[in-house]
């Protein structure tokens, strides 16, 4: 105790002999307090309490007066990185009210909202948690987890959740994007994630219709059961359509053989009969689909027609056969465990998005006001400037969700090169 007392006496002696040091010490304490106050002011300004109060988010306290002053409102707000937590909000407010005020909240906080949740626990204050958009800077093939049987990875949402699609629910996915929107990469990511599952590798035949073999030729080397057809070449195009017809006919005959035995099958993807092995399931990709699914018509060539006119008419007939197969897949193949991806530049997407009303799962890139209204029913949805670098609006499971597709490395080698 004596040593402590002597130290304080020494400090007093120094301060008496050097008043400048005393001023500096006082100034340091004052600056520290100023910084604390400023930080609290900045924190409160980020919470936008005045805006929330004006909007009616505050709840009146049961007491009329506190220390002689009217304490009419209280609210609890926490802003944690990409998450906003509300407590003590007005009891008249529900989750639906917060969703209705989505544009207002995005405006005052300057961030896009991707999800909201209401949490109510016993003996605890209810919470509304608002999630702001938070996509990773880099999202690659290595980040994709192995999907369950019958599923493939569509992308990651702004809340970090994986968005997958089950082919038992829908038989078709449309991928509509403008030029350089990442459409081909999105299709490649679906294929890559699907074939990460070992069951798919053994039991699914990948059939690709690729224009000039520009975007998907590498799958020929990485996937064992892969058939790829160049749609710019008439003979290859015809062989591809004939091949797909044979495969679908195999499934029609197999289904008939199973039903004749009186066996009821909900989905052939989950059905296995050792005494009657099923054919290979089909994972079909038709890129630049608007070339084949358009409403164009061609007259039959006359006896004096040129070879070019005859080839043009033969291509038209082949396209009609493919359209019939697409219709057939949409109507019947969900129960067979077969799946189709249609890719197209969105300038033509509306032509067959309306015609083929069974397309319920779609990936949509940034687009015009007219196409946004045409494809989603909302004229502003696809005007979002953040829809770039692999970001799409995913229409699926009855919801619209913004997703980011993983980047897939596709080392291109021209046909014929090893």
Image (cartoon, rainbow, N blue to C red):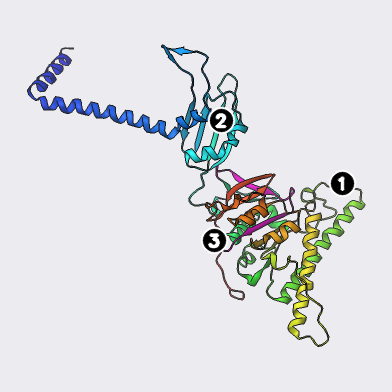
Return the residue at label 3. 409
What numbered label is drawn on residue 40? Answer: none
Magenta span contains residue 264 = no
What numbered label is drawn on residue 128? Answer: 2
The residue that appears at 42% across and 35% down in the rendered structure is 46
Q: Which of the two marks, 3 or 2, is nearer to us in this view?
A: 2
Query: Is residue 196 at all visible to an observer of this figure?
Result: no
User: Marks 1/2: CA distance?
Assistant: 46 Å
The residue that appears at 50% across and 48% down in the rendered structure is 136
Query: Is residue 63 at all visible to an observer of this figure?
Result: yes
Quadrant in the rendering for residue 356 = bottom right
Asked whether disc 3 touches disc 2, contact meaning CB atoms under 8 Å apart, the reply is no
What numbered label is drawn on residue 264? Answer: 1
Relative to residue 167, is residue 85 depicted above or below?
A: above
Relative to residue 46, is residue 375 depicted above or below?
A: below
Left or right: where 25 falls relative to 275: left
Q: Indicate the secondary structure of the residue bearing disc 3.
A: loop
Total labels drawn: 3
Mark 3 or mark 2, which has the lower sequence index? 2
Mark 1 or mark 2, which has the lower sequence index? 2
Q: Residues within 10 Å of mark 3 (few under 14, many from 20)?
A: few
Mark 3 or mark 1, which has the lower sequence index? 1
Q: Residue furthest bottom?
A: 304
**Which range is magenta?**
158-179
């Amino acid at each position: 105790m004596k040593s402590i007392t002597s130290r304080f006496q020494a400090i007093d002696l120094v301060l008496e002999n050097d008043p400048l040091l005393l001023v500096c010490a006082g100034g340091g304490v004052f600056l520290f307090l100023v910084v604390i106050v400023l930080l609290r002011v900045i924190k409160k300004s980020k919470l936008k309490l005045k805006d929330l109060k004006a909007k009616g988010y505050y709840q009146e306290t049961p007491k009329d007066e506190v220390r002689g002053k009217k304490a009419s409102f209280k609210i609890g707000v926490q802003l944690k990185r990409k998450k906003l937590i509300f407590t003590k909000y007005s009891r008249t407010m529900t989750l639906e009210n917060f969703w209705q005020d989505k544009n207002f909240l995005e405006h005052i906080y300057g961030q896009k909202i991707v999800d909201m949740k209401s949490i109510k626990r016993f003996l605890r204050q209810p919470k509304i948690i608002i999630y702001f958009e938070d996509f990773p800077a880099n999202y690659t093939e290595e980040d994709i987890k192995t999907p369950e049987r019958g599923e493939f990875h569509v992308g990651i949402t702004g809340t970090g959740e994986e968005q997958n699609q089950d082919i038992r629910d829908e038989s078709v996915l449309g991928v509509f994007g403008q030029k350089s929107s990442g459409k081909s990469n999105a299709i490649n990511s679906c294929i890559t994630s699907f074939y990460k599952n070992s069951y798919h590798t053994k039991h699914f035949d990948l059939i690709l219709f690729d224009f000039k073999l520009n975007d998907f030729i590498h799958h020929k080397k990485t996937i064992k059961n892969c058939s790829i057809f160049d749609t710019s070449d008439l003979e290859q195009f015809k062989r591809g359509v004939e091949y797909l017809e044979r495969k679908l006919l195999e499934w029609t005959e197999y289904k008939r053989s199973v039903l004749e035995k009186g066996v009821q099958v909900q989905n052939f993807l989950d059905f296995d009969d050792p005494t009657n092995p099923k054919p290979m399931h089909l994972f079909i990709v038709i890129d630049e689909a608007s070339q084949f699914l358009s409403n164009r018509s061609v007259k039959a060539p006359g006896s004096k027609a040129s070879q070019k006119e005859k080839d043009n008419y033969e291509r038209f007939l082949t396209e009609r056969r493919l359209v019939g197969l697409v219709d057939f897949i949409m109507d019947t193949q969900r129960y067979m465990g077969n799946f189709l991806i249609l890719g197209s530049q969105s300038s033509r997407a509306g032509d067959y998005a309306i015609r083929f009303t069974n397309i319920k799962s779609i990936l949509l890139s940034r687009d015009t006001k007219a196409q946004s209204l045409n494809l989603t029913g909302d004229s502003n949805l696809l005007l979002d400037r953040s829809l770039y670098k692999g970001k799409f609006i995913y229409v699926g499971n009855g919801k619209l969700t913004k997703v980011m597709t993983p980047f897939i490395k596709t080392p291109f080698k021209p046909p014929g090169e090893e």
